[in-house]
């Protein structure tokens, strides 16, 4: 993205899971629009690299290694971020994990791991950040997935977790609306060059099939998601809360995807 119609100069944007992929793309979008960015993810190396790239865009950035499954680590990180950049104007919650596996190929810990990262992690981030959200005016954006409302074989863990994320979005919108805090979910479609898409379409064949299935006939770009995040966080989004917003080129209209071939390819690669 080279230009932006949005101006977030001096605003504080906190991004959970912000060191790579879609969430990093969102961080870059806000950074280009003048915001100061704080971010967390598990890997200190990834956090450091992301912070350096954001600073190179001419803004201030700060990051800490923290696992969203650990509420105390999240609390420490949001406190440090608020100390550094002040109240949080935009909270992006997008840490997630995924792999293709049928229920019978999944141990209890495999299912729990994704629910812990995606759903419990979103709860921890929202819960621990709340004392530091600007009131009124803060905007919370949760990154969901179409699995939240499309039952999808090989994705039971993600379907269950992201459905919970969207329900959390809607309840928070109701509980926090009176405080002037808006809460929405963005549902990305298949976004090119991301870990998430690599895991669902691990071969060229499955990737092409995915792109062809999208009514707009292309994979998404991280900028597509960043633009929606900025629109939601701007004055143009000021009456939008509790919404679950697909940014997916229309893919969600086409029903459940068939991951049988991708799951077989992914099993060949990982086992
Ligand atoms: N099929 C079945 N089970 C799998 C699996 C697969 N492909 N990959 C991992 N698991 C199981 C593990 O065997 C383990 O269960 P067990 O203890 O009963 O053996 C459980 O999931 C947890 O795996 P582990 O590697 O210990 O978890 P982690 O916390 O280190 O990593 C993951 C979490 C598994 C989600 C990992 O893939 C990850 O870190 N993902 C982040 C990146 C990502 O997924 N990006 C896309 C976002 S959409
Ligand atoms: P990604 O690059 O792997 O992004 C996930 C981020 O979360 C990484 O920065 C990762 O960094 C971090 N993370 C993972 N587990 C964490 C944990 N326990 N605690 C803290 N941080 C953690 O993948 P992506 O594809 O861009 O996905 C980003 C979001 O978009 C996810 O919510 C995903 O469900 C959603 N989504 C993606 C697609 C797609 O096409 N890619 C489609 C629909 C929805 P560390 O490894 O350093 O922890």
Image (spheres, rainbow, N blue to C red):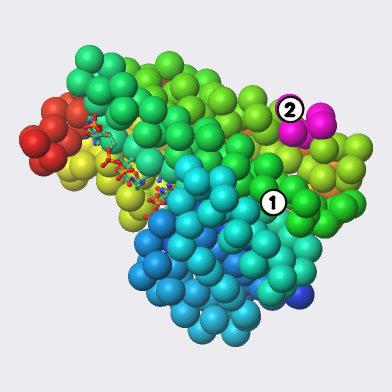
Q: Residue at x 35, y 26 (%)?
A: 111
Q: Is residue 60 left or right of residue 48?
A: right
**Magenta segment includes 262:** no
* Percent x, y of residue 200: 29, 37
Give the image quadrant in which the ligand numbered 1 is located: top left
Quadrant location, the N terminus: bottom right
10 Å crowding of disc 2: few (<14), some (14-19), many (20+): some
CA gap between label 1 and label 2 equals: 16 Å
Q: Residue at x 50, y 46 (%)?
A: 70
Q: Is residue 96 left or right of residue 173?
A: left
| Res. 173 visible in picture | yes
Instruction: Kindly identify which numbered label has been placed on residue 129.
Output: 1
* Percent x, y of residue 138: 79, 53
10 Å crowding of disc 1: few (<14), some (14-19), many (20+): many
* Percent x, y of residue 24: 49, 61
Which stretch appears magenta?
171-175
Q: Which residue is mark 2?
A: 171
Indicate which disc, 1 or 2, sits on the residue closer to the N terminus.
1
Q: Is residue 75 left or right of residue 144?
A: right
Q: Residue at x 53, y 69 (%)?
A: 63
Quarter-of-image position of residue 49: bottom left
């Amino acid at each position: 993205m080279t230009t932006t119609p949005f101006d977030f100069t001096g605003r504080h944007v906190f991004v959970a899971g912000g060191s790579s992929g879609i969430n990093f793309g969102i961080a870059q979008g806000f950074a280009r629009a003048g915001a100061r960015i704080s971010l967390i993810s598990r890997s200190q190396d990834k956090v450091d690299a992301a912070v350096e790239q954001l600073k190179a865009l001419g803004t201030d950035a700060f990051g800490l290694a923290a696992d969203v499954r650990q509420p105390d680590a999240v609390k420490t990180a949001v406190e440090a971020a608020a100390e550094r950049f002040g109240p949080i104007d935009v909270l992006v919650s997008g840490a997630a994990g995924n792999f293709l596996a049928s229920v019978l190929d999944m141990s209890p810990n495999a299912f729990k791991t994704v629910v812990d990262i995606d759903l419990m992690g979103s709860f921890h981030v929202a819960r621990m950040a709340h004392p530091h959200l600007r009131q009124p005016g803060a905007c919370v954006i949760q990154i969901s997935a179409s699995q939240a409302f499309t039952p999808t074989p090989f994705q039971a863990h993600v379907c269950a977790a992201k459905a919970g994320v969207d329900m959390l979005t809607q309840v928070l919108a109701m509980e926090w609306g009176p405080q002037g805090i808006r809460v929405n979910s963005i549902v990305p479609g298949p976004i090119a060059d991301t870990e998430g898409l690599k895991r669902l379409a691990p071969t060229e064949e499955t990737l092409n099939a995915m792109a062809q299935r999208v009514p707009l006939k292309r994979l998404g770009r991280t900028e597509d998601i960043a633009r929606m995040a900025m629109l939601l966080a701007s004055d143009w989004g000021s009456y939008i809360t509790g919404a679950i917003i697909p940014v997916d080129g229309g893919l969600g209209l086409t029903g459940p995807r068939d991951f049988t071939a991708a799951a077989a390819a992914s099993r060949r690669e990982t086992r």
